[in-house]
Amino acid sequence: MLDFSIIGDITKIETFAIGRKIRELARLRKQYGRDRWRKRKGIARVRLADGTVRMAEIHWYEASGIGKKEFKIKRYLP
């Protein structure tokens, strides 16, 4: 469940784990399907559940044909 929503585009996107380097790979494949999974991060403006808007570093899993899954905020930026 997301307790935030992403406003606008995600910038400064980086891939930092692919395939077997992802700890959650077995669960991702079972839940969403087999594909080439990547763990990615980027910067985005987010609206929190209380309505506050902040810049944050977000992480998510992504696979071609499946899309972006399981966004989470790793840290807030000034």
Image (cartoon, rainbow, N blue to C red):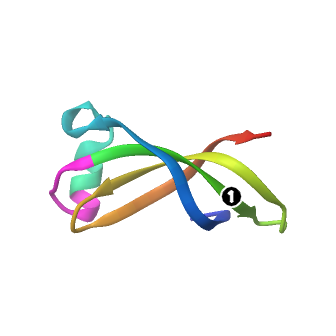
State which quadrant residue 19 falls in. Answer: top left
Is 70 left or right of 19, judged from the image as shown? right
Q: Residue furthest front?
A: 12
The C terminus lies in which quarter of the figure? top right
Query: How many dots with numbers?
Result: 1
Q: Nearer the viewer, residue 21 or 54?
A: 54
* Three-letter amino acid code at the position of disc 1: Arg
Where does residue 58 sit, x and y in percent of width and height?
Answer: 56, 48
Please tell me which residue is depicted at 26% across the width and 67% down the height of the picture. 66
Question: Is 13 colored magenta in this rendering?
Answer: no
Please tell me which residue is depicted at 67% across the width and 47% down the height of the picture. 56
Q: Which residue is mark 1?
A: 45
Q: Nearer the viewer, residue 73 or 45?
A: 45
Where does residue 5 sit, x and y in percent of width and height?
Answer: 64, 67
Where does residue 1 sit, x and y in percent of width and height?
Answer: 57, 65
Is 3 left or right of 51, judged from the image as shown? left
Please tell me which residue is depicted at 77% across the width and 54% down the height of the picture. 54
State which quadrant residue 15 falls in. Answer: top left
Q: Residue furthest top?
A: 21
Please tell me which residue is depicted at 32% across the width and 35% down the height of the picture. 17
Q: What's the magenta region?
A: 30-37
Is 40 left or right of 66, judged from the image as shown? right
Element type where label 1 sits in the image: strand
Where does residue 32 sit, x and y in percent of width and height?
Answer: 26, 63
